[in-house]
Amino acid sequence: MEQPKHYLRIEAGYTEIQYWKDIWRYRDLFYFLAWRDILVRYKQTFIGVSWALIRPFLTMVVFTIVFGKIANLPSDGDAPYPILVFSAMLPWHFFASALSECSNSLISNSNLISKVYFPRLVIPISAIIVSFVDFFISSSILLGLMAWFNFTPSWRILALPIFILIAFASAMGGGLWLAALNVKYRDFRYVVPFLIQFGLYVSPVGFSSNVIPDRWRLLYSINPMVGVIDGFRWSILGDERALYIPGFSISVLFVIVVLTSGVLYFRQMERTFADVI
């Protein structure tokens, strides 16, 4: 029986096409890396996954006291202030956690990168998936707050997956940039926590973006999390105020630019990861 012949295929752009097919072929690696990181995160902890609930809940309590009671900032419509804060805290914690985990993902898996071939894009995406799991666990707090305050969302809640997708794209775009830069410049391990802390205060987490003066509203919307948070509140709170379309459009456009450029930069630097790391 004649043995099948193997050919070396040389074709312009073939490697690039094969790379995206390889991501699908290595789809089981997403599950393995994500499940491993989840187990490591809560290993030998006394309360385990409850940390995914405690951290955002305590942050919500502090922001409610500072902004709602002391600063006496207004809520949106008839929504209770804790729900106003947590509807923003939910996407922000996902974004901040994903950005932090994604930026360190390549360094944390340096042994794997230097020894085994697979599309390196799998590693930062799996790190975001871990933060996505925490996001769904934390969502139970929002359901509890709605039950406590007897608050019923409107039909707009059906649009929430769209804003979740935008939050995912925003975290992935920024995470890919930081992950690639962190391999070459280890200073970014100190820069990322500062960026996250700074972003918390310039994003409308503890207050409504409606308090921003109209003349600065468009410029303020360059922050991609402004559009995400406004979208979450629009779909969850369901008040009479309409979504600020010009600002939301700018935020989404910025997310697309960051995601596209992040993927391109990551792919450009990917071939040097094994040598530099």
Image (cartoon, grey):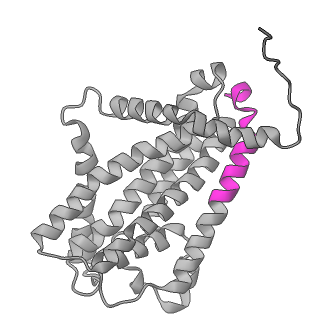
- The image quadrant where one finds the C terminus is top right
Is 76 situated above or below 188? below
Q: Residue furthest top?
A: 1
Screen quadrant of the N terminus: top right
In this view of the protein, can residue 207 be seen by the observer? no
**Residue located at (40% from left, 47% from top):** 131
Judging depth in this view, the residue of 202 and 152 nearest the camera is: 152
> Where residue 129 sits in the image (x, y, percent)?
44, 45
Hey, which residue is sitting farthest front in the picture? 1
82 relative to 122 in the view: left or right: left
Q: Residue at x 28, y 74 (%)?
A: 84
Residue at x 66% of width, y 64% of height: 257
Q: Main secondary structure of the magenta part?
A: helix
Q: Point out residue 152 in the picture as x, y percentages from the top left corner.
A: 19, 76
Q: Count the marks: how many? A: 0
Q: Give the residues in magenta.
A: 259-277
Of residue 162 and residue 80, the one placed in the foreground of this image is 162
Query: Residue, x 25% and y 26% (percent of image)?
Result: 44
The answer to whether residue 266 of the structure is visible from this angle is: yes
Q: Is 216 or 70 nearer to us in this picture?
A: 216
Query: Where does the image place residue 17, in percent across and percent down from the top left?
Result: 75, 43
**Magenta stretch contains residue 264:** yes
